[in-house]
Amino acid sequence: MNKVEFLKNIGKDVEELLLSQKLTNHKNQAFAWRLNAHFERTFDEQYLWTQALYLSTNCCLLLQDNKYNKLAIRGLSESGEIYESLGKLNNNKNEYDKEYFLILSALCYDLSGYQANAYCIASSVKDFILTTPDKDIDLSVDNSIIYQISLILTKLIPLAKSRLESENHIENLGYNLWEPLKTAVFLATLHHI
């Protein structure tokens, strides 16, 4: 299978998922539940999480190949809505990091062209810090990248740009992976100014 066939298969799967009545039903219930509607809850947060993760990941692949791919943009918008609902659900379950859902929502909204939504959500998540109970895992690079993304989403572009220019992260694998995105961040600064 070549790249074109691979992306075509992803597009077909994304389109089928977006047309899925099950996804629509669960997404709509989660949205209504977060608005404090009273009904017998039948939606599954785990199902919504996995579907939003599938959509956002694969739609980014499609968008990377074609930045005008309408299906990818629609899928990112849908996953942004799902992440937002999951991040704002009022329930007693603490198995998910709600602020992380909101960061993912803001990213999806931004990539799908809804910068105002992205800004509002990212602004509501002040200084998000990714944590883990495992003391052997260093999340400082991950948190630095999330902070950088938050600066961009909240339109603090000059600060984001100066951080990229002033900080030397060449020895760090996380920032080496981030390095190709510096160009994208620079282009984003031009887009958002």
Image: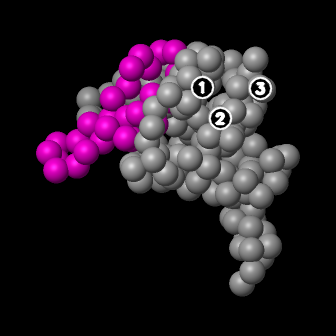
Indicate the secondary structure of the residue bearing disc 1. helix
Task: Please tell me which residue lies in front, 73 or 34.
Answer: 73
> Residue 84: x, y in percent?
52, 30
Give the residue number, with chain letter if any, for mark 1: 161
Q: Which mark is residue 185?
A: 2
Q: Residue at x 51, y 52 (%)?
A: 177
Which mark, by number, is residue 190?
A: 3
- Tell me the kind of residue under disc 2: Val
Q: Secondary structure at mark 2?
A: helix
| C-alpha distance separating marks 2 and 3 | 9 Å
- Say whether residue 124 is magenta: yes
Please report the residue visible at 50 percent of the width from the left and 28 percent of the height from the top. Answer: 166
Residue 45 within the magenta-colored segment of the rendering = no
Tally of numbered tags: 3
Q: Distance of mark 3 from mark 1, alpha carbons?
A: 11 Å
Task: Work out whether mark 2 precedes mark 3 in sequence or the reverse, and give the earlier one.
Answer: 2
Examine the rendered structure and indicate whether residue 171 appears above or below residue 14.
above
Asked whether, in this view, residue 63 is left or right of residue 144, the answer is right
Residue nearer the viewer, 193 or 25: 193
